[in-house]
Image (tube, rainbow, N blue to C red):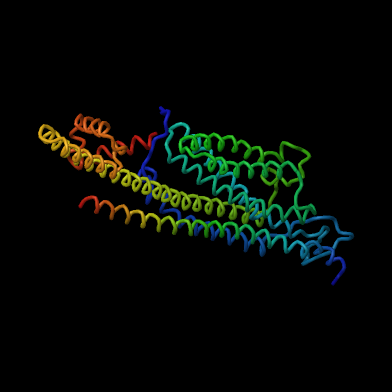
Amino acid sequence: MATDAPARETYEQLSVGRGGRLERLVPIALVLGVVLTVIDVVWTFTLAPLVQGAQLSEPVVIAGTQVTTKLLLSQKIFYLHVPVAVASFAIMLFAAIWAVRFLMTKSRRFDLYSKTSMEVTLVFIVATMISGDLWTRFEWGVWWTWEPRLTTYFILMLLVIGYFILRNALDDPERRARFSAVFCIVAFVDAPISFMITRLVPSSIHPVVFRTDSGLPPMMLIPFLLGLFGMLLIAFALTRLALRINVDAQEVEDLKERLEEQDAWKTRAAADAALERLRADASNLTAAAPTSDGSASSVRAAAASDVAGAGGPASDGSVDSLAASTRDASAHPSDLQTPSGAAAAASSHSHDSQEA
Amino acid sequence: MDPILAEVYSTVLPAAPYVIGAYVGIWVVLFVYVMVLSRRAKRTRDDIDALREALHSREDKLGK
């Protein structure tokens, strides 16, 4: 059952799975992905046939084959452009799944997973936009057109950028994680729309790649599948690498917090030491009071200057507040009399201020 | 060149810069991201080392 407040996990909890089986697969996946993609590129430009374009004015025989149309080189962009686009959808799917899991469990780990996946998604979207735009420029003669596939994919890119703007705009980690998770899920709705839009809108002029009657010959299908699996493996490896770095970045934040806690502890310890001195002085004052008013005043003045110098609880220097502080301290002597007690008090104090 | 053959290949050469640009563009984007990750990893590792050292030295001082 989900709790209302997100769990505050330590670095160790966030890095669950580190050094595990998935982690060991990362270098293998990266190398295999690059090898498959390189084979795809080589195959594309050597073995895969050129597709046919517009009709020729008259047929011609080339290498024993009758050719009736122009040959299109630009189609070769498809062998890498489509795998990159599919990889962007796949990673975003995982980002949305982890966002849902965050909302279910409130575990900060899933927020980190989701954010990392969105980061890699953005990289693949940018790569898809660049390659697609170059194809558009050559085939359609324009750098951009508000065609349904292009438009929905452009919106997807804006949504992913918006996700990071939202994250940076929110300071509170809990709200940031919750709002980002919801935004990620909503943004993901555009992914299947963008994927299906060429089928849903008949006027779409973008080529439809995934269809049962695509009739890709094996010499074209094999490099495409190699590129697809290669890019998915690269996407997986990059996501895991980025995740490892983001978990480390979280450790940096945790260490900074611990240092800040120590600073608070030092301040508190100095105040406690001053308070100890005060109590000793107060005892002296009590002992000296019946004998001499003048000496009592000097002890009071010394005590006030001690506390003012330490910046302790009674830093206004008034004797009344000093006395009140001393009473407070006496009410919890165990907090003050041992260093560990003081540390516990400091820790409690810093914890309270963090929660505030 | 045979005018028919020239017509057959008329779209091949003009498309070459775009095709090359698309392939290079994809690899450049991925490579830049890997570089960014690599730099971020190094910086994070340095930060962790420095912060751990600072934390240990402070803990030692407080222990004394």
At x 54% / y 49%, what residue is drawn? A120
At x 72% / y 63%, what residue is drawn? B17
Between A332 and A140, the one lying in front of the other is A332
Relative horizontal placement of residue A36, taking residue A56 as reference (left or right): left
Q: Is residue A319 above or below residue B22?
A: above
Relative horizontal placement of residue A140, taking residue A178 as reference (left or right): right
Q: Position of residue A88 (x, y in %)?
A: 59, 47
At x 36% / y 36%, what residue is drawn? A353
Between A62 and A225, the one lying in front of the other is A225
Q: Position of residue A180 (x, y in %)?
A: 53, 37
Farthest residue in the bottom direction? Answer: B1
Relative horizontal placement of residue A226, taking residue A206 as reference (left or right): left
- For the question of whether residue A112 can be seen, the reply is yes
* Quadrant where the N terminus of chain A is found in the figure: top left
Q: Position of residue A346 (x, y in %)?
A: 28, 39
Q: Is residue A74 above or below residue A212?
A: below
Between A134 and B53, the one lying in front of the other is B53
